[in-house]
Amino acid sequence: MDAALNDRRLARVAAAGVAFTVVVVAASALLRLGTTLDAGGNAASTLAPALESVARIAHRVSASAVGLLAIAAIVLALRDRPVPCGRRAGLVAIVVFTAVLAAIGRYTPGYRFTGVTVANAVLGVALAAAFAWLRLQSADRGARLPRARLLVLAAVLAEIALGTAASAAAMHGRLAFEPLHVALGPAVAALAAWAALGQRGGIAALAIAQMALGIALAAMGASRALPGQWLHAMLACALVLALAGARSRNRTRPQAAGEMRKIRESGA
């Protein structure tokens, strides 16, 4: 198969993987944040029945689609031998994250295990980021993720983990993790904005908006509303995707376009 055609197909599969994974993350966050525990520790939804049904259906359908897209991405990537070095990390991450999420899925509802709740939230966002990286690699084989931005990505994912852990602890009447989550928020946002230097303004704007909303929610305390919490979670997801899917500032579009022309010519 022509290398350029295979790359385009892989890019489309990866883009679909991003979209469906984001739906899974969004539905999962809505169901999680819309859950409360009664005195007996039993989970109950605070969502309107219709909204809860839509969220659950969207989650199940999209999760199935993500599994199929992960398989399709592997098949397409393996048609190009050897697999480009920069693409391997994304493929391995997609396989591992998809497998782990499928394994822990049955234990996720109801805040039964804090570790499972945190893993579900963090790995869902990380899986979307892996698809975003694979999409970038398919469009530009020379794309790279600078070490500094990789560290910022890890910091944002750690902040997501702390926020999810704080939410899970709050369901049991504990304030564990929330002070640390609130304290580290501005530092992580500043790191993300620093990583965006030389890029378009979208990454910095996402970092600032996510931090500002987090501070506002922390000030509200127990009175914080579900829509604000859900938006805060989704802004963090969008920030991770922007960090994972943006070209390095040291790599210009003309350079990338020139390399893509060489790939097409060699495959012709």
Image: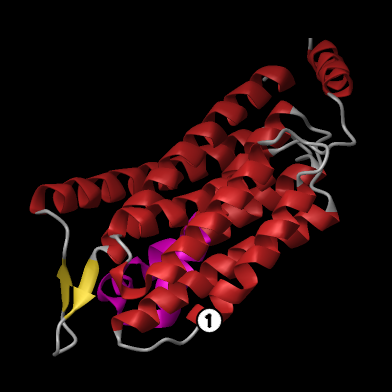
Specify the principal SS of the magenta part. Answer: helix
Question: Where is residue 99 shown, x and y percent of the image?
Answer: 48, 61
Which coloring applies here? Answer: secondary structure
Q: Residue at x 39, y 74 (%)?
A: 167
Q: Give yes or no for residue 60 being in the magenta stretch.
A: no
Asked which quadrant contains residue 222, the reply is bottom left
Magenta segment boundaries in residue numbering: 99-124
Q: Is residue 133 visible?
A: no
Question: Would you say 249 lies left or right of 109 here?
Answer: right
Question: Would you say 88 lies left or right of 256 here?
Answer: left
Query: In terms of depth relative to the viewer, which is nearer, 49 or 221?
Result: 221
Q: Quadrant of the C terminus?
A: top right
Q: Residue at x 30, y 80 (%)?
A: 171
Which residue type does callout 1 highlight?
Pro
Question: Where is residue 68 shown, x and y percent of the image?
Answer: 42, 42
For label 1, the SS is helix
